């Protein structure tokens, strides 16, 4: 076997070893065999193309075409020409499978069922794409080191989705494959220098010694690098023990006798659940409670607020208590409570690690491996346990405090108050300021909580909108308070943060709002009932639910005053979305008799919903052509503006903070400042020094003092990069450029400002860059002409 063929074999093996990290994500794991066979065919095509030999781009193209044909044969043979050649119908089917796979990934917990063709296409197709990249880099271009990047991407995706139970094993597999690929490439290169590098040295007497010194050295380096990667995390406290930490902590690992739990944030898919096109039943609930409007099913509480988002704290879990659970924290004997029995049946596809239950639970009867988190009074699955297809019984307390009891609640304990009123320093002051304004005139924590609830639900002018992004960062709540549009996540986050700013202990609960009663006496809980709400602590009552989200859930009875003209919605009324108002005219089903329904003679509820079965419409390629033409008409005039926005974002975006990153960042910022001035009519003069160029921009742009100072700060940073022995990173340069841009815009007329935005002069750099690349291509073609007359030097 030639050295290049041996290297291709190791590239195939390294890709499969890295792909093994995906095995815990899907059950069963037979897909890896399928991927291995298809990847072997794709790699074999590459080996044959290199042996012909074909040019490197043609080799990669041949592998890509064969890989696509293999996927077509495996997944879309019925939509392809001769079952092998993909056409428009096959590509549409691929798109549908990928969409289905994305939906299934959001729907299923790990491990997902392999019955989903969408998930199988993502796995097998992803391995083929990564394998093509690794083979191209390591074998075709003989550069094995960069091939570690696609391998790392494959492992990182798997590690990010798995539960972390055996990540270190998959890391070892991926790292071993990569190191062997590096050694194979190194040996293949060294072997071309002579026998001393390709084989072991001869000993006296004609025998062979040990391995060649370069190979031994390479293996030692590889082993040392692998050992460092595994051992260094053990010495870094921030990394929680590293890959070799064998303490057995955490749900899903260990002995099951204790440990801690650090849960993923359940808010990731909440908005997607609310926006599903086809609502699906998640849970079927039967209860003896007479207050169905208060039947919230709580999954987990989020009590750690870092300024960007709320998430569950890392807490210790124990065995599920036998019999009755401990009394909830803070609940006194004087508060009315009713014991209720609830039976919950989860759908076969709903795999949730946390157990949805009414709060507070006082006992659970359930099969499987479950652990109990005492602070939040929640149950979480252990060793891969989830809710898929389970039926369980929950005893819970329906706590019914009065407004008087909540108003008279004493001050919470100091430790609890300190933990649950903690706010990050990055939280904008407007949050606390708004909380004080809303609660002005109140006399206790209960009145403050009710005022906050009514502000969001009724009087503040907020609108419920599930299309709004959740947002991140310390400014997310401030933006929500300004825009006044959002869904339950925004309302619960904002109210909990504002309550904490007032000294009221608060956290956010995630679960399901009350579902819809059914004719058989059960309650159907669907994806669109997914919800988040704030819980505030009152001593003597405990954690108490509030409902700030308008048109969602039910307003607690203890927050409603029985006075005329009260504006708070009636808690007995079912929740409904404002976007689904009842129609004025009767629907077709209402005006159709039972006899006509039986004969299927009723008209459709919507003429737009009737599918057109006949022909006569434009062909798909005509629709596609017109669509692309219309898109071009819309996009082409805006292309210069879009290009400048993209370039500006790249130049002023995030960058490294080390000394090595100072020069590229400063020079990029200076280039953006020069192009910005050019857009406003001040063309650059490359012969000037940065200081002279800055003076010219300030003078011709007629900048004010603040903008001028910003321009000079950027110029000073450029001079330091150009002339200082060790340039240091300079902070705030991006903001200086934005301030200079504002000054330039203020000094010009409306026409110049519009031209700078929609037709910026600096976009001529695109033409210059294209001209340079064309000239370079022509030079390469001219230099390659003599070589094209001879056989390629590429050997198999």
Image (cartoon, rainbow, N blue to C red):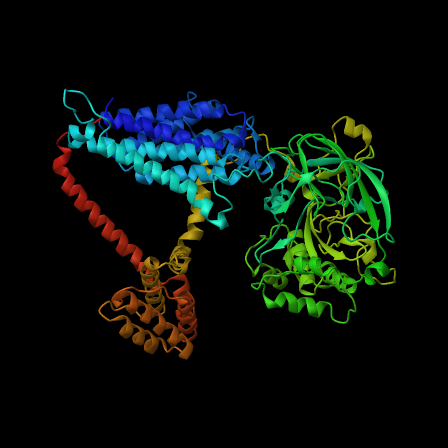
Q: Nearer the viewer, residue 521 or 430?
A: 430
Residue 389 appears left or right of 294: left
User: Quarter of the image holding residue 790?
Assistant: top left
User: Quarter of the image holding residue 280?
Assistant: top right
Q: Nearer the viewer, residue 756 or 432?
A: 432
Residue under the point 85% across and 63% down: 565
Residue 113 on image: x %, y %: 57, 28
Residue 260 appears left or right of 700: right
Is residue 701 shown above or below 660? below
Q: Is residue 691 visible from the viewing direction of this image? A: yes
Residue 629 on image: x %, y %: 43, 46
Q: Nearer the viewer, residue 9 or 372?
A: 372
How many numbered marks does the figure carry? 0
Residue 428 on image: x %, y %: 58, 65
Q: Is residue 80 visible from the viewing direction of this image? A: no
Residue under the point 27% across and 51% down: 770
Is residue 763 shown above or below 86? below
Query: Looking at the figure, which quarter contains the C terminus?
Result: top left
Residue under the point 38% across and 57% down: 647
Residue 89 appears left or right of 392: left
Is residue 452 shown above or below 257? below
Is residue 694 shown above or below 68? below
Query: Looking at the figure, which quarter contains the N terminus?
Result: top left
């Amino acid at each position: 076997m030639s050295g290049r063929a041996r290297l291709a074999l190791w590239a195939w093996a390294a890709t499969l070893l890295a792909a093994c990290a995906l095995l815990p994500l899907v059950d069963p794991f037979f897909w890896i065999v399928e991927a291995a066979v298809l990847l072997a065919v794709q790699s074999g095509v590459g080996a044959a193309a290199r042996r012909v030999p074909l040019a490197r781009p043609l080799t990669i193209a041949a592998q890509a075409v064969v890989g696509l044909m293999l996927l077509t044969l495996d997944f879309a043979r019925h939509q392809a020409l001769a079952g092998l050649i993909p056409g428009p119908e096959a590509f549409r089917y691929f798109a549908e499978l990928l969409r289905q796979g994305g939906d299934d990934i959001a729907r299923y917990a790990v491990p997902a069922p392999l019955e989903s063709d969408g998930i199988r296409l993502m796995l097998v197709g992803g391995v083929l794409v990564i394998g093509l990249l690794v083979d191209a880099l390591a074998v075709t271009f003989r550069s094995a080191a960069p091939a570690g990047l696609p391998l790392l991407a494959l492992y990182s995706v798997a590690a990010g989705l798995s539960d972390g139970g055996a990540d270190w094993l998959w890391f070892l597999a991926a790292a071993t494959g990569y190191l062997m690929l590096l050694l194979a490439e190194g040996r293949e290169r060294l072997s071309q220098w002579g026998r001393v590098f390709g084989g072991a040295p001869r000993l006296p007497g004609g025998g062979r010694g040990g391995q060649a010194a370069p190979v031994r050295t390479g293996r030692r380096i590889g082993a040392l690098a692998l050992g460092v990667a595994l051992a260094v995390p053990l010495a870094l406290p921030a990394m929680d023990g590293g890959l070799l930490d064998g303490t057995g902590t955490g749900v899903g690992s260990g002995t099951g006798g204790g440990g801690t739990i650090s849960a993923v944030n359940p808010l990731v898919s909440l908005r997607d659940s609310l926006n599903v096109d086809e609502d699906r039943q998640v849970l079927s609930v039967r209860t003896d409670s007479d207050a169905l409007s208060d039947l919230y099913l709580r999954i987990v509480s989020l009590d750690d607020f870092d300024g960007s988002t709320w998430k569950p704290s890392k807490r210790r879990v124990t065995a599920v208590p036998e019999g009755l659970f401990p009394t909830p924290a803070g609940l006194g004997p004087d508060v009315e409570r009713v014991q209720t029995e609830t039976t919950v049946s989860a759908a076969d596809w709903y795999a949730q690690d946390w157990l949805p239950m009414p709060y507070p639970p006082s006992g659970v009867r359930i099969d499987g491996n479950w652990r109990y988190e005492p602070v939040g009074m929640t149950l979480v699955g252990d060793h891969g346990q989830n809710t898929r297809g389970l039926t369980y019984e929950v005893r819970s307390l329906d706590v019914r405090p009065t407004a008087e009891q909540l108003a008279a609640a004493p001050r919470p304990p100091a430790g609890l108050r300190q933990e649950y009123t903690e706010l990050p320093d990055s939280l904008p002051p407007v949050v606390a300021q708004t909380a004080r304004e809303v609660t002005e005139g109140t006399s206790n924590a209960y009145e403050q909580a009710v005022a906050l609830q009514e502000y969001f639900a009724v009087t503040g002018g907020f609108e419920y909108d599930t299309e709004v992004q959740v947002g991140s960062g310390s400014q997310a709540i401030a933006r929500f308070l300004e825009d006044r549009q959002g869904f339950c996540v925004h309302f619960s986050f904002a109210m909990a943060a504002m309550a904490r700013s007032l000294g009221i202990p608060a956290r956010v609960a995630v679960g399901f709002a009350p579902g819809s009663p059914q004719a058989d006496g059960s309650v159907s809980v669907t994806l669109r009932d997914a919800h988040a709400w704030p819980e505030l602590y009152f001593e003597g009552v405990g954690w108490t639910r509030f409902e700030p989200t308008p048109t969602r859930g039910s307003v607690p009875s203890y927050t409603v005053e029985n006075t005329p003209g009260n504006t708070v919605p009636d808690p007995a009324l079912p929740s409904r979305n404002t976007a689904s108002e009842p129609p004025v005219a009767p629907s077709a089903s209402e005006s159709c008799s039972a006899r006509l329904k039986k004969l299927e003679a009723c008209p459709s509820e919507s003429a737009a919903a009737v599918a057109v079965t006949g022909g006569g419409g434009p062909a798909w390629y005509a629709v596609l052509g017109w669509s692309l033409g219309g898109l071009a008409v819309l996009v082409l005039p805006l292309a210069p503006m879009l290009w400048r926005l993209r370039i500006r974002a790249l130049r002023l975006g995030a960058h490294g903070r080390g000394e090595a990153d100072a020069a590229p960042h400063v020079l990029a910022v200076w280039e953006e400042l020069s192009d910005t001035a050019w857009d406003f009519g001040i063309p650059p003069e490359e012969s000037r020094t940065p200081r002279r160029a800055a003076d010219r921009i300030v003078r011709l742009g007629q900048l004010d003092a603040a903008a001028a100072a910003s321009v000079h700060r950027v110029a000073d940073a450029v001079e330091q990069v150009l002339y200082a022995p060790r340039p240091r990173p300079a902070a705030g340069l991006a903001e200086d450029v934005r301030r200079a841009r504002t000054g330039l815009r203020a000094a010009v007329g409306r026409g110049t400002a519009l031209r700078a935005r929609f037709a910026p002069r600096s976009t001529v750099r695109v033409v210059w860059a294209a001209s340079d690349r064309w000239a370079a291509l022509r030079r390469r073609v001219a230099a390659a002409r003599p070589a094209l007359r001879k056989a390629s030097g590429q050997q198999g």
